[in-house]
Image (cartoon, rainbow, N blue to C red):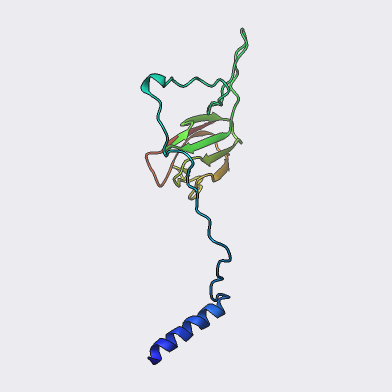
Amino acid sequence: MGRGLLAAGLLAASLAACGGGAAPQPTATPRPILISSTDTPGPYPAPSEIQPAVPNSTALTPFATSTVEAGATASPTPSNDLRVQDFSFAPPTLTVNLGTQLTWTNFGPSNHTVTANDGSFDSGILLPNAKFTFTLSTPGTLAYHCSIHPTMQGTLIVR
């Protein structure tokens, strides 16, 4: 009998210490909860009433598009940005001038590295969305890879 009183006393002390106590009593009658005023899930249309979706011409496309006027030619914009994504380097081969600063960005969900085969540079581990920048100071062909995923390989041709 003493144990039951002790437990009740500890419970009351715990509730008081936490700011709790006896729950307030409701002053009004609880109202019923209205779940739906119609049949759930609702009437389905007859198969003869179903129409194909109408294409929405205002929908945005997830891909960038560009147009070139008639007679004009699109000139490529040189880029010093390389992508690490889908377990590959893009572009896989890049020709650049001596002294060019390159930036690799990890656009994939996995960690990668950008490591020169000759040891001239190493990014360390690139987390997703991280960048590594390196300035090329030696002419020639420079192969690089991901040390975590050795099948990922790229080549820089430095003029």
> Where does the N terminus fall, quadrant-wise?
bottom left
- Res 35 visible: yes
Q: Quadrant of residue 152?
A: top left
> Where does the C terminus fall, quadrant-wise?
top right
**Above or below 75: residue 126:** below
Q: Nearer the viewer, residue 28 or 44?
A: 28
Q: Please, which residue is most extreme toward the front here?
A: 29
How many numbered marks does the figure carry?
0
**Residue 14 on image: x %, y %:** 51, 80
Q: Nearer the viewer, residue 85 or 82?
A: 85
**Above or below 2: residue 68:** above
Q: Is residue 124 found left or right of 2 in the rendered image?
A: right
Residue at (57, 43) in percent of width and height: 133
Q: Please, which residue is most extreme toward the bottom here?
A: 2
**Residue 10 on image: x %, y %:** 47, 84
**Residue 135 on image: x %, y %:** 59, 40
**Residue 61 on image: x %, y %:** 54, 26
Residue at (49, 31) in percent of width and height: 91
**Above or below 72: residue 98:** below
- Res 159 visible: no
Residue at (50, 40) in percent of width and height: 107
